[in-house]
């Protein structure tokens, strides 16, 4: 949907300029006149240059804010099309403005909101669309949108906490690796020259360190290029290759500290979405299918898909979870209680709250758990390098004695 760049005067005669979204120049002028702007000129705004590998993407935070605003507008009695129009004009980015305006036009042409959102599956997830559809069916669209925004806000907050917790260990690792690289490429070659000119016999650890150092110094640039290329290949492979993503997700689940955190996060995501969908009136099989895709880990997603298939064949949810071997006993027992009492969505919500707290606590303790491991590993490497280079001197001293 095009943006138009305009120039005009307000009611006080001050010259104003800006951009406005509209389907045509005439609509843009009509919108400006309704805002009591005396139009001087209106012309199509130049399109932003968008490279294929740098395609703009709507951020989770922006979508969360839009969802929250739409819920507030609808709950205050504002019509859906008018709410969408206001948000399209006030959108933070052009991409979001265009999406909202397109959705508004579809709604005005008779489509439901969920149908209009389905035209933009790159922005709105299946879970989002299904929950909106459920809200439309039950007449509680504003309530469902509010719940969606709350779920998204929790997810954004958790991601921010995890990133924050990893900043310090990451910086320490980068500095330590830099120090090790400097030692290997500049300090150790000096020792190697000194020992070579003396003709003394070198202990095995010293020989290994010197050989590695000389190799690194000779092929440093090549190694750096290969390392960067590998990182890029892994990143692209994770996004494009199902097999690589599955392998890396499996490795993640088996890692100490991070594996348990990933598993708890997957269970929290799955149960939160399942509770929200089922309480909104979505069929249990559809709810399981959608919530499986929000697990955030392919191994967990495959497990949840197997659970859904068993439920489809007539098994109850708790038995299907137990058969997978991936769920803790507490989750299985609470699911069983929910099925027996007809309060499955409530039990799923309680499970999600418990695991959200568990993940939150784990993230808070992440730095304190990683820090000693980093110190031991990196300190051990640097210590080994230093001792290896001084071993010949120590042996020389012993010989003199």
Image (tube, rainbow, N blue to C red):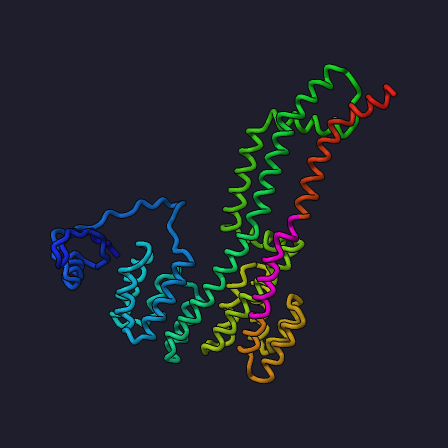
From this viewpoint, which residue is outermost toward the bottom? 341
- Residue 362, picture quadrant: bottom right
Magenta stretch, overall SS: helix
Q: Position of residue 279 (x, y in %)?
A: 48, 77
Q: Which quadrant of the rendered structure holds the C terminus? A: top right
| Nearer to us in this view, 134 or 241 | 134
User: Which residues lie in the magenta part?
Assistant: 353-371
* 94 sits left or right of 383 in the view: left
Number of marks in the rendered image: 0
Query: What residue is at 57 percent from the left and 62 percent from the top?
Result: 360
Query: What residue is at 65 percent from the left and 55 percent from the top?
Result: 257
Q: Which quadrant of the rendered structure holds the N terminus? A: bottom left
The correct choice, above or below, for 210 with respect to 169 in the image is above
Q: Position of residue 295 (x, y in %)?
A: 54, 63
| Nearer to us in this view, 202 or 298 | 202
Q: Does residue 243 show up?
A: no
Query: What residue is at 13 percent from the left and 59 percent from the top?
Result: 11
Is residue 51 magenta-colored?
no
Q: Position of residue 213 (x, y in %)?
A: 66, 27
């Amino acid at each position: 949907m095009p943006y138009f760049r305009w120039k005009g005067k307000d009611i006080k005669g001050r010259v104003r300029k800006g951009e406005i979204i509209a389907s045509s120049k005439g609509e843009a002028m009509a919108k400006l006149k309704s805002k009591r702007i005396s139009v001087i000129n209106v012309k199509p705004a130049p399109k932003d240059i968008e490279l294929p590998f740098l395609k703009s993407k709507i951020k989770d935070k922006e979508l969360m804010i839009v969802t929250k605003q739409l819920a507030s507008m609808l709950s205050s009695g504002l019509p859906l099309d008018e709410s969408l129009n206001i948000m399209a004009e006030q959108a933070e980015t052009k991409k979001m403005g265009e999406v909202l305006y397109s959705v508004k036009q579809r709604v005005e042409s008779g489509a439901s909101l969920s149908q209009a959102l389905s035209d933009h599956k790159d922005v709105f997830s299946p879970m989002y669309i299904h929950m909106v559809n459920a809200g439309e069916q039950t007449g509680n669209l504003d309530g469902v949108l509010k719940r969606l925004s709350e779920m998204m806000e929790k997810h954004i907050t958790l991601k921010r906490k995890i990133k924050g917790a990893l900043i310090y260990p990451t910086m320490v690792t980068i500095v330590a690796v830099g120090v090790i690289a400097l030692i290997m490429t500049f300090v150790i070659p000096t020792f190697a020259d000194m020992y070579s000119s003396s003709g003394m016999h070198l202990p095995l650890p010293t020989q290994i360190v010197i050989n590695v150092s000389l190799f690194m110094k000779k092929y440093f640039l090549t190694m750096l290029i290969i390392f960067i290329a590998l990182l890029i290949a892994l990143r692209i492979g994770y996004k494009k290759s199902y097999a690589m993503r599955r392998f890396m997700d499996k490795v993640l689940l088996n890692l100490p500290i991070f594996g348990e955190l990933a598993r708890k996060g997957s269970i929290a995501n799955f149960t939160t979405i399942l509770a929200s969908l089922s309480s909104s009136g979505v069929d249990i099989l559809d709810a399981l299918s959608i919530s499986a895709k929000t697990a955030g880990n392919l191994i967990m997603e495959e497990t949840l898909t197997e659970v859904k298939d068993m439920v489809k064949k007539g098994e109850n949810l708790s038995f299907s979870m137990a058969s997978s071997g991936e769920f803790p006993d507490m989750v299985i027992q609470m699911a069983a209680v929910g099925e027996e009492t007809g309060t499955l969505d409530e039990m799923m919500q309680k499970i999600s709250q418990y695991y959200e707290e568990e993940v939150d606590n784990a993230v808070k303790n992440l730095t304190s758990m990683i820090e000693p491991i980093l110190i031991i590993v990196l300190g051990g490497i640097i210590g080994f390098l230093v001792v290896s280079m001084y071993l010949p001197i120590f042996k020389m001293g012993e010989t003199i004695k």
